[in-house]
Amino acid sequence: MDTQNITLSLPKAILMKVKVIAVQQQISVSGLLTRELQRLVRQEEAYGHAHRRHMQLLDRASDLGTNGEIKTSRDELHERR
C-alpha cells in the first residue's frame, strides 16, 4: 500500500491521550490513526451501499394503488376530532 505523510494538528490534551491509547494497544500513533480512519471509511462506504440498496428497493416497491400520487392532504390524514 502506498502511503503519504500528512501534517496533523491536535490539541495537546487529545494527543497525550492518543499516545496512551497507542501504547496500551502496542501500536504507533500513526498505526492507530490509520486503523481508525480505515474503520471510518468502511463505515461510510457501508452506509452508502445500504442507502443505495434501500433506494433501489423503494424504486421497485409496489404501487399500492396510488400511482405514485398522494391524494389525501396531511391535514385530512391527521384530522383531530
Image (cartoon, rainbow, N blue to C red):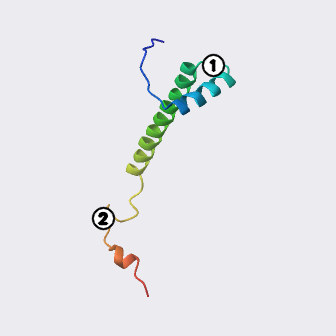
Picture coordinates of residue 48, whole percent (x, y): 43, 38
Picture coordinates of residue 79, whole percent (x, y): 40, 81
Q: Is residue 60 left or right of residue 17?
A: left
Q: Name the residue type under label 1.
A: Ile
Q: Is residue 25 above or below residue 48?
A: above
Dividing the picture into quarters, in which one does residue 22 lie? Answer: top right
Q: Nearer the viewer, mark 1 or mark 2?
A: 1
Q: Which residue is mark 2?
A: 69
Q: Is residue 46 left or right of residue 21?
A: left
Residue 25 seen in the current view: no
Nearer-the-camera pick, 37 or 20: 20
Residue 27, numbered label = 1
Dividing the picture into quarters, in which one does residue 69 lie? Answer: bottom left
CA neighbours of label 1 inside 10 A, class few (<14), some (14 to 19), many (20+): few
Nearer-the-camera pick, 54 or 46: 46
Q: Residue furthest bottom?
A: 81
Q: Is residue 13 left or right of residue 75?
A: right
CA neighbours of label 2 inside 10 A, class few (<14), some (14 to 19), many (20+): few
Residue 67 seen in the current view: yes
Q: Please tell me which residue is depicted at 41% across the width and 41% down the height of the picture.
A: 52
Sequence-first tag of 1 and 2: 1
Element type where label 1 sits in the image: loop
Q: Quadrant of the C terminus?
A: bottom left
Dividing the picture into quarters, in which one does residue 13 lie? Answer: top right
Q: Please tell me which residue is depicted at 58% across the width and 28% down the height of the picture.
A: 16
Element type where label 2 sits in the image: loop
Q: Are marks 1 and 2 in contact (CB under 8 Å)?
A: no
Nearer-the-camera pick, 44 or 53: 44
Nearer-the-camera pick, 22 or 60: 22
Picture coordinates of residue 45, whole percent (x, y): 46, 34
Q: Please tell me which residue is depicted at 52% across the width and 23% down the height of the picture.
A: 34
Q: Is residue 4 above or below residue 11?
A: above
